[in-house]
Amino acid sequence: MAAEESQYLLAQPTSDAYLRVQNKKLYLATFAAVLGPLSFGFVLGYSSPAIPELRKINNPELRLDDNRASWFGSIVTLGAAAGGILGGCLVDKIGRKLSLMLCSVPYVSGYIVIISAQNIWMLYFGRILTGLASGITSLVVPVYISEISHTSVRGMLGSFVQLMVVTGILGAYIAGMALKWQWLAVLCSFPPCIMLLFMLFMPETPRFLLDQNKRAEAIAALQFLRGLYVDHEWECQQIEANAEEEGLSLFELKNPSVYRPLLIGVILMFLQQATGINAVMFYAETIFEDANFQDSRMASVVVGSIQVCFTAVAALIIDKTGRKVLLYVSGIIMALSTALFGFYFKMVLPSGNNSSNADLWFTLNSVSPGTETRLSWLAVVSLGLFVAGFALGWGPVPWLVMSEIFPLKARGISSGACVLTNWVMAFLVTKEFHDFVGFLTSYGTFWLFSAFCCLSVIFAAFYVPETKGQTLEQIEAYFRKS
Protein backbone atom coordinates (compact mmCIF):
# COMPACT_ATOMS: atom_id res chain seq x y z
CA MET A 1 0.00 0.00 0.00
CA ALA A 2 1.37 3.45 -0.95
CA ALA A 3 2.51 5.86 1.76
CA GLU A 4 -0.12 8.43 0.71
CA GLU A 5 -2.90 5.87 1.08
CA SER A 6 -1.58 4.82 4.51
CA GLN A 7 -1.61 8.43 5.66
CA TYR A 8 -5.14 8.87 4.33
CA LEU A 9 -6.42 5.85 6.22
CA LEU A 10 -4.82 6.99 9.45
CA ALA A 11 -6.22 10.48 9.01
CA GLN A 12 -9.71 9.22 8.08
CA PRO A 13 -10.68 6.54 10.65
CA THR A 14 -14.20 6.20 9.29
CA SER A 15 -16.24 3.63 7.43
CA ASP A 16 -14.83 5.03 4.15
CA ALA A 17 -11.38 4.05 5.30
CA TYR A 18 -12.64 0.64 6.34
CA LEU A 19 -14.08 0.10 2.87
CA ARG A 20 -10.59 0.41 1.44
CA VAL A 21 -9.02 -2.05 3.85
CA GLN A 22 -9.17 -5.55 2.45
CA ASN A 23 -8.83 -7.46 5.70
CA LYS A 24 -9.45 -11.12 5.18
CA LYS A 25 -9.02 -11.89 8.87
CA LEU A 26 -12.34 -10.22 9.71
CA TYR A 27 -14.08 -12.60 7.32
CA LEU A 28 -12.11 -15.52 8.74
CA ALA A 29 -13.30 -14.65 12.27
CA THR A 30 -16.87 -14.38 10.96
CA PHE A 31 -16.57 -17.77 9.24
CA ALA A 32 -15.31 -19.37 12.46
CA ALA A 33 -18.24 -17.90 14.40
CA VAL A 34 -20.96 -18.86 11.90
CA LEU A 35 -19.96 -22.50 12.13
CA GLY A 36 -22.07 -22.26 15.31
CA PRO A 37 -25.26 -21.34 13.42
CA LEU A 38 -24.38 -24.05 10.87
CA SER A 39 -24.36 -26.54 13.77
CA PHE A 40 -27.64 -25.02 14.97
CA GLY A 41 -29.15 -25.57 11.51
CA PHE A 42 -28.13 -29.22 11.54
CA VAL A 43 -29.89 -29.59 14.90
CA LEU A 44 -33.12 -28.15 13.48
CA GLY A 45 -32.90 -30.17 10.26
CA TYR A 46 -31.96 -33.45 11.94
CA SER A 47 -35.48 -34.34 13.07
CA SER A 48 -36.99 -34.27 9.57
CA PRO A 49 -35.04 -37.27 8.17
CA ALA A 50 -34.58 -38.99 11.56
CA ILE A 51 -38.25 -39.19 12.62
CA PRO A 52 -39.44 -41.39 9.69
CA GLU A 53 -36.65 -43.87 10.42
CA LEU A 54 -37.31 -43.88 14.17
CA ARG A 55 -41.00 -44.59 13.48
CA LYS A 56 -40.00 -47.85 11.80
CA ILE A 57 -37.24 -48.98 14.17
CA ASN A 58 -37.63 -52.45 15.71
CA ASN A 59 -36.71 -51.44 19.26
CA PRO A 60 -40.00 -50.45 20.98
CA GLU A 61 -38.04 -48.37 23.52
CA LEU A 62 -36.87 -46.10 20.69
CA ARG A 63 -39.77 -46.34 18.25
CA LEU A 64 -41.63 -43.05 17.77
CA ASP A 65 -45.41 -42.74 17.66
CA ASP A 66 -47.14 -39.45 16.84
CA ASN A 67 -46.81 -38.09 20.37
CA ARG A 68 -43.16 -39.11 20.75
CA ALA A 69 -42.33 -37.73 17.30
CA SER A 70 -43.94 -34.42 18.23
CA TRP A 71 -41.80 -34.17 21.37
CA PHE A 72 -38.65 -35.32 19.55
CA GLY A 73 -39.04 -32.44 17.11
CA SER A 74 -40.16 -29.70 19.50
CA ILE A 75 -38.20 -30.43 22.68
CA VAL A 76 -35.18 -28.78 21.04
CA THR A 77 -36.93 -25.43 21.44
CA LEU A 78 -37.21 -25.91 25.21
CA GLY A 79 -33.48 -26.62 25.42
CA ALA A 80 -32.82 -23.57 23.26
CA ALA A 81 -34.97 -21.38 25.53
CA ALA A 82 -32.85 -22.50 28.48
CA GLY A 83 -29.76 -21.86 26.37
CA GLY A 84 -30.91 -18.29 25.80
CA ILE A 85 -31.02 -17.68 29.56
CA LEU A 86 -27.66 -19.36 30.13
CA GLY A 87 -26.08 -17.57 27.18
CA GLY A 88 -27.24 -14.20 28.48
CA CYS A 89 -25.27 -14.85 31.67
CA LEU A 90 -22.20 -16.39 30.02
CA VAL A 91 -21.69 -13.76 27.33
CA ASP A 92 -21.15 -10.97 29.86
CA LYS A 93 -19.28 -13.08 32.42
CA ILE A 94 -16.73 -15.04 30.40
CA GLY A 95 -16.89 -13.26 27.06
CA ARG A 96 -18.21 -13.87 23.57
CA LYS A 97 -15.37 -16.06 22.34
CA LEU A 98 -15.24 -18.47 25.28
CA SER A 99 -19.06 -18.75 25.40
CA LEU A 100 -19.05 -19.78 21.75
CA MET A 101 -16.26 -22.30 22.25
CA LEU A 102 -18.10 -23.89 25.20
CA CYS A 103 -21.14 -24.47 22.94
CA SER A 104 -19.30 -27.31 21.24
CA VAL A 105 -19.50 -29.39 24.44
CA PRO A 106 -23.34 -29.78 24.62
CA TYR A 107 -23.50 -30.05 20.81
CA VAL A 108 -21.19 -33.06 20.67
CA SER A 109 -22.43 -34.54 23.97
CA GLY A 110 -26.02 -34.39 22.72
CA TYR A 111 -25.21 -36.27 19.53
CA ILE A 112 -23.23 -38.89 21.48
CA VAL A 113 -26.28 -39.47 23.70
CA ILE A 114 -28.54 -39.78 20.63
CA ILE A 115 -26.20 -42.23 18.90
CA SER A 116 -25.94 -44.42 22.01
CA ALA A 117 -29.62 -44.10 23.01
CA GLN A 118 -31.23 -47.18 24.54
CA ASN A 119 -34.64 -45.63 25.21
CA ILE A 120 -36.79 -42.64 24.30
CA TRP A 121 -35.59 -40.58 27.27
CA MET A 122 -32.02 -40.71 26.02
CA LEU A 123 -33.22 -39.42 22.65
CA TYR A 124 -35.05 -36.57 24.39
CA PHE A 125 -32.03 -35.76 26.56
CA GLY A 126 -29.75 -35.68 23.55
CA ARG A 127 -32.12 -33.31 21.76
CA ILE A 128 -32.30 -31.06 24.85
CA LEU A 129 -28.50 -30.85 24.98
CA THR A 130 -28.23 -29.92 21.31
CA GLY A 131 -31.07 -27.45 21.84
CA LEU A 132 -29.23 -25.90 24.80
CA ALA A 133 -26.16 -25.39 22.61
CA SER A 134 -28.35 -23.93 19.85
CA GLY A 135 -29.88 -21.41 22.24
CA ILE A 136 -26.46 -20.19 23.41
CA THR A 137 -25.24 -20.07 19.81
CA SER A 138 -28.24 -18.05 18.60
CA LEU A 139 -27.43 -15.41 21.23
CA VAL A 140 -23.63 -15.30 21.19
CA VAL A 141 -22.85 -15.39 17.46
CA PRO A 142 -24.89 -12.29 16.42
CA VAL A 143 -23.32 -10.34 19.29
CA TYR A 144 -19.80 -11.53 18.41
CA ILE A 145 -20.16 -10.66 14.73
CA SER A 146 -21.72 -7.23 15.35
CA GLU A 147 -18.92 -6.31 17.77
CA ILE A 148 -16.03 -7.33 15.50
CA SER A 149 -17.51 -5.90 12.27
CA HIS A 150 -17.18 -2.38 10.95
CA THR A 151 -20.21 -0.41 9.81
CA SER A 152 -19.95 -0.97 6.05
CA VAL A 153 -20.22 -4.78 6.24
CA ARG A 154 -21.95 -5.39 9.59
CA GLY A 155 -25.33 -6.04 7.98
CA MET A 156 -23.95 -8.51 5.46
CA LEU A 157 -21.83 -10.40 7.99
CA GLY A 158 -24.68 -10.39 10.54
CA SER A 159 -27.03 -11.88 7.95
CA PHE A 160 -24.65 -14.82 7.53
CA VAL A 161 -25.99 -16.10 10.86
CA GLN A 162 -29.39 -16.92 9.36
CA LEU A 163 -27.79 -17.99 6.06
CA MET A 164 -25.73 -20.63 7.85
CA VAL A 165 -28.75 -21.79 9.86
CA VAL A 166 -30.77 -22.51 6.71
CA THR A 167 -27.68 -24.01 5.05
CA GLY A 168 -27.38 -26.40 7.99
CA ILE A 169 -31.06 -27.33 7.71
CA LEU A 170 -30.65 -27.99 3.98
CA GLY A 171 -27.47 -29.98 4.64
CA ALA A 172 -29.30 -32.20 7.14
CA TYR A 173 -32.14 -32.77 4.64
CA ILE A 174 -29.72 -33.78 1.86
CA ALA A 175 -27.49 -35.92 4.09
CA GLY A 176 -30.58 -37.59 5.56
CA MET A 177 -31.44 -38.95 2.12
CA ALA A 178 -28.25 -41.05 2.17
CA LEU A 179 -27.41 -41.64 5.85
CA LYS A 180 -29.12 -43.58 8.64
CA TRP A 181 -30.14 -41.56 11.69
CA GLN A 182 -27.08 -42.62 13.75
CA TRP A 183 -24.61 -41.72 11.01
CA LEU A 184 -26.44 -38.47 10.38
CA ALA A 185 -25.88 -37.63 14.05
CA VAL A 186 -22.17 -38.36 13.60
CA LEU A 187 -22.05 -35.99 10.63
CA CYS A 188 -23.91 -33.29 12.57
CA SER A 189 -21.27 -33.38 15.30
CA PHE A 190 -18.48 -32.26 12.94
CA PRO A 191 -19.35 -28.53 12.52
CA PRO A 192 -19.15 -27.72 16.27
CA CYS A 193 -15.79 -29.50 16.49
CA ILE A 194 -14.44 -27.47 13.56
CA MET A 195 -15.87 -24.30 15.16
CA LEU A 196 -13.99 -25.03 18.38
CA LEU A 197 -10.74 -25.51 16.46
CA PHE A 198 -11.10 -22.27 14.48
CA MET A 199 -12.23 -20.15 17.43
CA LEU A 200 -9.04 -21.06 19.33
CA PHE A 201 -7.18 -18.72 16.97
CA MET A 202 -9.76 -15.92 16.79
CA PRO A 203 -9.76 -12.79 19.01
CA GLU A 204 -12.24 -11.76 21.66
CA THR A 205 -14.33 -8.73 20.66
CA PRO A 206 -12.68 -5.33 21.30
CA ARG A 207 -15.80 -4.03 23.05
CA PHE A 208 -15.82 -6.82 25.61
CA LEU A 209 -12.08 -6.43 26.23
CA LEU A 210 -12.46 -2.69 26.79
CA ASP A 211 -15.38 -3.34 29.11
CA GLN A 212 -12.99 -5.57 31.10
CA ASN A 213 -10.31 -2.82 31.09
CA LYS A 214 -8.01 -4.86 28.85
CA ARG A 215 -7.00 -2.06 26.50
CA ALA A 216 -3.80 -3.60 25.16
CA GLU A 217 -5.65 -6.80 24.21
CA ALA A 218 -8.41 -4.74 22.59
CA ILE A 219 -5.81 -2.94 20.44
CA ALA A 220 -4.33 -6.33 19.47
CA ALA A 221 -7.80 -7.60 18.52
CA LEU A 222 -8.40 -4.52 16.35
CA GLN A 223 -5.04 -5.01 14.65
CA PHE A 224 -6.08 -8.58 13.81
CA LEU A 225 -9.54 -7.55 12.58
CA ARG A 226 -8.80 -4.24 10.84
CA GLY A 227 -5.21 -4.57 9.69
CA LEU A 228 -2.34 -2.16 10.29
CA TYR A 229 -3.53 0.88 8.30
CA VAL A 230 -6.39 1.97 10.53
CA ASP A 231 -6.32 4.22 13.58
CA HIS A 232 -7.02 1.65 16.31
CA GLU A 233 -6.64 4.25 19.06
CA TRP A 234 -9.43 6.29 17.51
CA GLU A 235 -11.81 3.31 17.43
CA CYS A 236 -10.98 2.44 21.04
CA GLN A 237 -11.69 6.02 22.07
CA GLN A 238 -15.06 5.92 20.29
CA ILE A 239 -16.02 2.72 22.11
CA GLU A 240 -14.80 4.02 25.47
CA ALA A 241 -16.59 7.34 25.03
CA ASN A 242 -19.93 5.52 24.87
CA ALA A 243 -19.15 2.85 27.46
CA GLU A 244 -20.52 3.17 30.97
CA GLU A 245 -18.39 1.65 33.67
CA GLU A 246 -21.10 0.54 36.06
CA GLY A 247 -22.95 -2.71 35.50
CA LEU A 248 -26.65 -3.06 34.82
CA SER A 249 -28.98 -2.84 37.82
CA LEU A 250 -32.70 -3.53 37.98
CA PHE A 251 -33.31 0.17 38.60
CA GLU A 252 -31.74 0.99 35.22
CA LEU A 253 -34.38 -1.08 33.41
CA LYS A 254 -36.55 2.03 33.86
CA ASN A 255 -34.10 3.93 31.68
CA PRO A 256 -35.53 4.41 28.13
CA SER A 257 -32.07 3.77 26.67
CA VAL A 258 -32.31 0.24 28.12
CA TYR A 259 -35.97 -0.73 28.03
CA ARG A 260 -36.82 0.74 24.59
CA PRO A 261 -34.34 -1.41 22.63
CA LEU A 262 -35.23 -4.37 24.87
CA LEU A 263 -38.94 -4.04 24.01
CA ILE A 264 -38.14 -3.64 20.31
CA GLY A 265 -35.97 -6.77 20.35
CA VAL A 266 -38.50 -8.89 22.26
CA ILE A 267 -41.40 -7.83 20.01
CA LEU A 268 -39.33 -8.53 16.88
CA MET A 269 -38.69 -12.06 18.12
CA PHE A 270 -42.34 -12.54 19.06
CA LEU A 271 -43.51 -11.40 15.63
CA GLN A 272 -40.92 -13.53 13.83
CA GLN A 273 -42.56 -16.66 15.21
CA ALA A 274 -46.13 -15.30 15.18
CA THR A 275 -45.95 -14.91 11.39
CA GLY A 276 -46.38 -18.69 11.22
CA ILE A 277 -43.08 -19.92 9.79
CA ASN A 278 -43.17 -23.18 11.76
CA ALA A 279 -46.79 -23.84 10.82
CA VAL A 280 -46.11 -23.31 7.12
CA MET A 281 -43.04 -25.55 7.26
CA PHE A 282 -45.19 -28.12 9.08
CA TYR A 283 -47.51 -28.26 6.06
CA ALA A 284 -44.72 -28.25 3.46
CA GLU A 285 -44.36 -31.97 2.71
CA THR A 286 -48.13 -32.56 2.64
CA ILE A 287 -48.66 -29.66 0.25
CA PHE A 288 -46.01 -30.94 -2.15
CA GLU A 289 -47.51 -34.43 -2.04
CA ASP A 290 -50.92 -33.01 -2.95
CA ALA A 291 -49.28 -31.31 -5.92
CA ASN A 292 -48.01 -34.72 -7.11
CA PHE A 293 -44.48 -34.44 -5.68
CA GLN A 294 -44.10 -38.08 -4.73
CA ASP A 295 -40.79 -37.80 -2.83
CA SER A 296 -41.53 -35.72 0.26
CA ARG A 297 -37.84 -35.70 1.19
CA MET A 298 -37.03 -34.00 -2.09
CA ALA A 299 -39.79 -31.48 -1.31
CA SER A 300 -37.94 -30.61 1.91
CA VAL A 301 -34.77 -30.07 -0.11
CA VAL A 302 -36.66 -27.74 -2.47
CA VAL A 303 -37.98 -25.68 0.43
CA GLY A 304 -34.54 -25.59 2.05
CA SER A 305 -32.96 -24.45 -1.22
CA ILE A 306 -35.44 -21.56 -1.48
CA GLN A 307 -34.53 -20.51 2.06
CA VAL A 308 -30.80 -20.58 1.33
CA CYS A 309 -31.09 -18.64 -1.94
CA PHE A 310 -33.22 -15.79 -0.58
CA THR A 311 -31.29 -15.53 2.68
CA ALA A 312 -28.14 -15.15 0.56
CA VAL A 313 -29.87 -12.39 -1.44
CA ALA A 314 -30.77 -10.62 1.81
CA ALA A 315 -27.16 -10.84 3.03
CA LEU A 316 -25.88 -9.29 -0.19
CA ILE A 317 -28.28 -6.33 -0.29
CA ILE A 318 -28.98 -5.53 3.37
CA ASP A 319 -26.20 -2.94 3.69
CA LYS A 320 -27.53 -1.13 0.62
CA THR A 321 -31.29 -1.32 1.18
CA GLY A 322 -31.25 -1.07 4.97
CA ARG A 323 -32.96 -3.28 7.54
CA LYS A 324 -36.42 -1.69 7.49
CA VAL A 325 -36.98 -1.99 3.74
CA LEU A 326 -36.36 -5.75 3.91
CA LEU A 327 -38.76 -6.04 6.86
CA TYR A 328 -41.46 -4.19 4.84
CA VAL A 329 -41.02 -6.30 1.69
CA SER A 330 -40.77 -9.53 3.66
CA GLY A 331 -43.84 -8.81 5.81
CA ILE A 332 -45.99 -7.87 2.81
CA ILE A 333 -44.99 -11.02 0.88
CA MET A 334 -45.73 -13.22 3.90
CA ALA A 335 -49.07 -11.49 4.55
CA LEU A 336 -50.18 -12.14 0.96
CA SER A 337 -48.95 -15.74 0.90
CA THR A 338 -50.58 -16.73 4.22
CA ALA A 339 -53.81 -15.07 3.05
CA LEU A 340 -53.61 -17.22 -0.07
CA PHE A 341 -53.02 -20.27 2.12
CA GLY A 342 -56.21 -19.44 3.99
CA PHE A 343 -58.09 -19.04 0.72
CA TYR A 344 -56.75 -22.41 -0.47
CA PHE A 345 -58.02 -24.24 2.60
CA LYS A 346 -61.33 -22.38 2.48
CA MET A 347 -61.87 -23.54 -1.09
CA VAL A 348 -60.70 -27.16 -0.85
CA LEU A 349 -62.37 -28.11 2.44
CA PRO A 350 -65.95 -29.37 2.24
CA SER A 351 -68.33 -27.10 4.12
CA GLY A 352 -68.69 -29.73 6.83
CA ASN A 353 -65.01 -29.36 7.67
CA ASN A 354 -65.14 -25.59 7.98
CA SER A 355 -65.92 -25.95 11.64
CA SER A 356 -63.86 -25.69 14.75
CA ASN A 357 -63.67 -29.48 14.94
CA ALA A 358 -61.65 -29.92 11.76
CA ASP A 359 -58.62 -32.10 12.42
CA LEU A 360 -55.34 -30.99 10.91
CA TRP A 361 -54.20 -34.48 10.02
CA PHE A 362 -57.36 -35.17 8.01
CA THR A 363 -57.74 -31.73 6.50
CA LEU A 364 -56.14 -32.42 3.15
CA ASN A 365 -57.39 -36.01 2.99
CA SER A 366 -61.02 -34.95 3.18
CA VAL A 367 -61.10 -32.42 0.36
CA SER A 368 -63.04 -32.76 -2.85
CA PRO A 369 -60.66 -34.46 -5.30
CA GLY A 370 -61.43 -32.15 -8.22
CA THR A 371 -61.05 -28.99 -6.19
CA GLU A 372 -57.78 -30.19 -4.65
CA THR A 373 -56.27 -30.97 -8.05
CA ARG A 374 -57.31 -27.62 -9.54
CA LEU A 375 -55.95 -25.58 -6.63
CA SER A 376 -52.84 -27.53 -5.63
CA TRP A 377 -50.73 -25.06 -7.59
CA LEU A 378 -52.04 -22.28 -5.34
CA ALA A 379 -50.74 -24.04 -2.23
CA VAL A 380 -47.32 -24.64 -3.80
CA VAL A 381 -47.03 -21.00 -4.95
CA SER A 382 -48.13 -19.75 -1.54
CA LEU A 383 -45.57 -21.96 0.17
CA GLY A 384 -42.75 -20.81 -2.10
CA LEU A 385 -43.69 -17.14 -1.68
CA PHE A 386 -43.90 -17.42 2.10
CA VAL A 387 -40.54 -19.19 2.51
CA ALA A 388 -38.86 -16.71 0.12
CA GLY A 389 -40.42 -13.73 1.88
CA PHE A 390 -39.41 -14.94 5.33
CA ALA A 391 -35.85 -15.65 4.21
CA LEU A 392 -35.58 -12.19 2.65
CA GLY A 393 -36.36 -10.21 5.80
CA TRP A 394 -38.06 -11.58 8.89
CA GLY A 395 -35.68 -14.55 9.01
CA PRO A 396 -32.30 -12.76 9.22
CA VAL A 397 -33.14 -9.16 10.18
CA PRO A 398 -34.51 -9.62 13.75
CA TRP A 399 -31.34 -11.48 14.74
CA LEU A 400 -29.20 -8.76 13.17
CA VAL A 401 -31.10 -5.90 14.81
CA MET A 402 -30.96 -7.71 18.17
CA SER A 403 -27.17 -7.71 17.96
CA GLU A 404 -27.04 -3.98 17.13
CA ILE A 405 -29.46 -2.04 19.32
CA PHE A 406 -28.60 -2.99 22.91
CA PRO A 407 -26.20 -0.93 25.05
CA LEU A 408 -22.98 -2.73 25.91
CA LYS A 409 -23.78 -3.10 29.61
CA ALA A 410 -27.20 -4.66 28.87
CA ARG A 411 -26.26 -6.69 25.79
CA GLY A 412 -26.11 -10.06 27.55
CA ILE A 413 -29.34 -9.91 29.55
CA SER A 414 -31.29 -8.17 26.75
CA SER A 415 -30.15 -10.66 24.11
CA GLY A 416 -31.03 -13.49 26.51
CA ALA A 417 -34.58 -12.13 26.88
CA CYS A 418 -34.95 -11.97 23.08
CA VAL A 419 -33.66 -15.50 22.52
CA LEU A 420 -35.91 -16.82 25.30
CA THR A 421 -38.93 -15.11 23.70
CA ASN A 422 -38.10 -16.52 20.28
CA TRP A 423 -37.71 -20.12 21.42
CA VAL A 424 -40.70 -20.13 23.77
CA MET A 425 -42.83 -18.81 20.90
CA ALA A 426 -41.37 -21.45 18.56
CA PHE A 427 -42.32 -24.16 21.05
CA LEU A 428 -45.86 -22.82 21.54
CA VAL A 429 -46.52 -22.46 17.81
CA THR A 430 -45.17 -25.97 17.13
CA LYS A 431 -46.99 -27.73 19.98
CA GLU A 432 -50.27 -25.79 19.97
CA PHE A 433 -50.80 -25.56 16.23
CA HIS A 434 -53.31 -28.44 16.34
CA ASP A 435 -55.35 -26.56 18.93
CA PHE A 436 -55.33 -23.42 16.82
CA VAL A 437 -56.63 -25.36 13.83
CA GLY A 438 -59.29 -27.02 15.98
CA PHE A 439 -60.47 -23.67 17.35
CA LEU A 440 -60.12 -21.40 14.29
CA THR A 441 -60.14 -23.97 11.42
CA SER A 442 -57.22 -24.29 9.00
CA TYR A 443 -58.10 -21.23 6.93
CA GLY A 444 -58.83 -19.14 10.02
CA THR A 445 -55.43 -20.01 11.49
CA PHE A 446 -53.59 -18.92 8.35
CA TRP A 447 -55.60 -15.71 8.16
CA LEU A 448 -54.54 -15.06 11.75
CA PHE A 449 -50.92 -15.50 10.67
CA SER A 450 -51.59 -13.07 7.82
CA ALA A 451 -52.86 -10.50 10.33
CA PHE A 452 -49.66 -10.90 12.37
CA CYS A 453 -47.63 -10.38 9.18
CA CYS A 454 -49.47 -7.10 8.59
CA LEU A 455 -48.86 -6.13 12.21
CA SER A 456 -45.15 -6.86 11.76
CA VAL A 457 -44.96 -4.37 8.87
CA ILE A 458 -46.68 -1.68 10.96
CA PHE A 459 -44.38 -2.31 13.92
CA ALA A 460 -41.28 -2.14 11.70
CA ALA A 461 -42.47 1.14 10.19
CA PHE A 462 -43.12 2.98 13.46
CA TYR A 463 -40.83 1.46 16.09
CA VAL A 464 -37.77 -0.25 14.54
CA PRO A 465 -34.86 2.16 14.00
CA GLU A 466 -32.79 2.03 10.83
CA THR A 467 -29.27 0.92 11.80
CA LYS A 468 -27.69 0.88 8.34
CA GLY A 469 -24.42 2.80 8.22
CA GLN A 470 -24.26 3.51 11.95
CA THR A 471 -21.70 2.30 14.46
CA LEU A 472 -22.90 0.44 17.54
CA GLU A 473 -21.92 3.49 19.59
CA GLN A 474 -24.06 5.79 17.40
CA ILE A 475 -27.03 3.44 17.78
CA GLU A 476 -26.56 3.42 21.55
CA ALA A 477 -26.35 7.22 21.57
CA TYR A 478 -29.59 7.41 19.56
CA PHE A 479 -31.54 5.54 22.24
CA ARG A 480 -29.87 7.56 24.98
CA LYS A 481 -30.95 10.86 23.41
CA SER A 482 -34.42 9.86 22.28
Image (cartoon, helix red, strand yellow):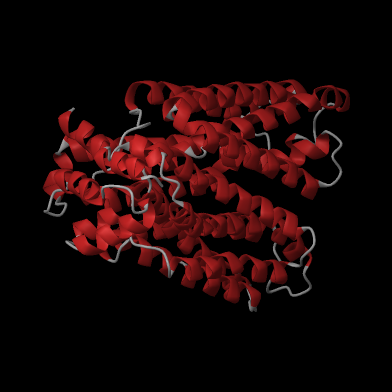
Viewer-closest of 371 and 397? 397
On screen, 336 above or below 29? above
On screen, 142 above or below 333? below
Q: Position of residue 374 (x, y in %)?
A: 84, 22
Taking 365 as reference, is 395 left or right?
left
Taking 193 as reference, is 170 left or right?
right
Picture quarter with the C terminus: top left
Residue at point 58%, 75% (across, down): 113
* Quarter of the image where one finds residue 19: top left
Residue at point 63%, 35% (across, down): 387
On screen, 88 above or below 328? below
Viewer-closest of 190 and 335? 190
Viewer-closest of 252 and 102? 102
Residue at point 62%, 65% (across, down): 188
Residue at point 15%, 49% (across, down): 250
Taking 83 as reference, is 413 left or right?
left
Viewer-closest of 120 and 466? 466
Q: Position of residue 340 (x, y in %)?
A: 66, 22
* Quarter of the image where one finds residue 264: top left
Q: Position of residue 102 (x, y in %)?
A: 42, 69
Q: Position of residue 379 (x, y in %)?
A: 73, 28
